[in-house]
Structures are given as structure tokens and as C-alpha cells.
Image (spheres, rainbow, N blue to C red):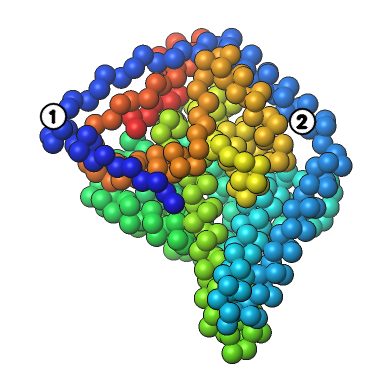
Amino acid sequence: MFGLSLPTIPFIPFLSGSSTPAEPEPLVLTREHIDELGRELDALREQTVASLGDEDREYIYRIIKAQRGFEVAGRGLMFFGFFPPAWVAGVTALSVSKILDNMEIGHNVMHGQYDWMREPSLNSRTFEWDTVCPSDQWRHSHNYMHHTYTNIVGKDRDIGYGILRMDPNQKWHPYYLGNPVYATALMLLFEWGVMMHDAEAENIVAGTRSWQEVLPLAKGWWRKVRRQVVKDYVAFPLLTGPLFVPTLVGNATANVVRNVWAYSIIFCGHFPSGVQSFSEDDTAEETRGEWYVRQLLGSANISGSPLFHIMSGNLSHQIEHHLFPDLPAHRYPELAPRVRELCEEYGLPYNSRGLTAQVGSVWKKIFTFALPPNWVSQTPDISVLLERSPREQADDAPGTLARENV
């Protein structure tokens, strides 16, 4: 599935005899261009907000209806789990249901994309999804922390999720030799990793966060985990009587399928080659235009069919999602061509490739960053320099918003 391609010898200088390639000349974006780009993207957002209406309302209702239909079908087919094709069909239907619930419904509703409808069941503050992570904790770790500090090393904890080395600016430690193992475990247990995200386990280990601070989070975990475990691993299996074990295994399989899919889509939007990271200094006192540029440079898209985009929650348009996180995600495909045009107009990269290419790139990075920095040699990507305001330039040189070596 992942299409791994790991030409390891060229990564090892003392085996390949290669030297570190020279860093390419950076692109420079002027203050005027940054401000103008910001105005263009603001206008694009305002046009979309003004056009929201019945079509968007009907779309989300259709998705919810489809998700519920797949869940009913999946649960029902488990009563015929003694027949292998029925069991496989049930697992498939339940997997699709869970993917739609998490990706196209839960993630997007909790971003406030449908708050304008004033529909109580689609209220971002009260919506709960079919996963072990409590929605309020997810809204803090994702909506606030990640979308505010996108790809800022030291601020955005989605860079490595506290357990992986995914950026050259993360200091290497022998612990990271296990990068591929940790990544595989996170992929299979992704909903549990998302649940634990706000605990900041790496800070607990480092002694900079106490267990007392985690207790309020743990209470939320217990309430949500108890409900999810009872539903998938006790109640529904019991309903199928003598097929308890096949049903339990089927439900667990559907959860793993959902975890692998969600992990793959999310990692492909954040960590493939060409996605760039930032420092706190480079992003201090950011303007609106600079924030937009950071979202453009710190995200990647995955090309695919309309069905693929629905199954990804339209996070296959991660660039547009980072630019406009509160717009209905099904609008991203129509916004993408204009965003791409703006990138071409201002000389900015627009990172978009197929799923196999992006997944392979992510896993290549996972293996590469597991090794000590002096063991690997990669062609650096072109970085982007932003002209800062005169006051900032008096104190510092123009900040490098993006510098990535893999």
C-alpha cells in the first residue's frame, strides 16, 4: 500500500562516496507580494463564505445519510459473519462508515465548517465522533495548537506527535533509531495516539510536565474510551450471540483500517518531501499574508478522484484546508485551481502528487530521520525567504520561513 522506495546506499555518504549537495538559491517574496497575496486569499475566502447555502447543507446531509447507511449495513452483516464473504463485506462497510464519520464529518464539523447552519447536531462545540479521543481535547490540540502554529518547530506538536523525528531541526537522539517502529505503531493505533496527544507525553518524560496536569485529560479519556470500548467490543458483539468473536474481530479490524487510512492521509498532507518547516523567530509578529504563506509552504495535497477526496475528508486538499480551515471541505476542490494559480503567479511551490508518491516520500523521511544527521545526504529543497517589515529588518536579517533538507 505504501509504495516504499528506499535507496539506502545513496543516503549514506561513507558508503556512496557522495558529499552534501550545495543548497539551492532561495526564492525571495517581497513585502508587497506577501500583502497582495494575503488580500487575494482573503477575497477568495469572502467570496466562498458569501456563496454558502442549500448546496452545502444538502451535501453534508447526504454524507451523514451515507455514513449511517454503511454503519447499519456493516453491523447487520456481522450477524452473518459465519459466512466469510458477509464478514468481509461487513468489515468493509463498517470501515467506510468510520472513515466518513472521522474524516468528512467529524473533523470538518468540529472545525466549525457548518456552524453557519445553526443545526444543533452539527455544532462544532458539542459534536462528538466515533473515536476514543474526546472532541474537546481534539479541538484544542488540532484546531488551536496545530492550525495556529502550523509547522513551527517547538510550537506545533503535530511535527512528530511527540514520538517521531520528522524534521531536520529536531535534535537527533539514539531513541529515534526506532522511528519506523514508532511510526508503524502510531499508524495502527492512530486514534489512541490522537487521544494521548494533549497529554504531551514527551514533556512528562522530560520532567517539564507533571502527571497532575494530565488528570483532567485522563477523566475525559476514561469517559470516551469506556463508551467506545463497550460499543465496539462488548455491546455489538454480544448482540450477535454465538458470533461474538467474529464480530469483535471485525469491529477491531474496521478500527485499524480507519486508523491506517487517517494516518496515511494526514501524514501525506504534512510530511512529504517539499513540505517546509519554520522557526519561532521567523514567524514572530506574523502578518495575515505571512500566515497564508506559511500555510502554503507547510502543506501538501494528494491528487485523486472525487470519491477519493470524499473518503479523505477532502484533506487530500490539505493546502486549501490550512488556508481556510473553517470553510466546508467539499469546497476545496473548486478553490484549488485558483490557489494553484496564485502560487504560480507569486512563484511559490504548490505541492501536489498522487497518493503512492506522497506516502512513499513520507516513509522515506521516517527512515531517513531515524539516522544520525551525519549519516544522511539529501538534495535540499528550495527555501523561501520573506522580506519582513523595516522595523523587523533593522533587528534581524529577512527571516527564512522555510528550510527543509529532505
Q: Quadrant of the C terminus?
A: top left
Residues packed near mark 2 inside 10 Å, few (<14), some (14 to 19) or many (20 plus): some
Separation of disc 1 and disc 2 at Cα? 53 Å
287 or 327, nearer to the observer: 327
Q: Find residue 166 and name its label.
A: none
On screen, residue 294 above or below 77: above
Q: Amino acid at mark 1?
A: Gly
21 or 356, nearer to the observer: 356
In the picture, residue 344 is in which quadrant?
A: top right
Q: Is residue 287 left or right of residue 383?
A: right
Q: Secondary structure at mark 2?
A: helix
Q: Find residue 17 and name its label.
A: 1
Residues packed near mark 1 inside 10 Å, few (<14), some (14 to 19) or many (20 plus): few
Q: Earlier in the sequence, mark 1 or mark 2?
A: 1
Identify the residue at image location x=40%, y=42%.
Answer: 360
On screen, residue 137 above or below 309: below
Q: Is residue 260 visible?
A: yes
Which residue lies under the disc numbered 2? 48
Q: Is residue 320 left or right of residue 152?
A: right
Q: Is residue 143 visible?
A: no
Identify the residue at image location x=46%, y=13%.
Answer: 28
Identify the residue at image location x=83%, y=47%.
Answer: 58
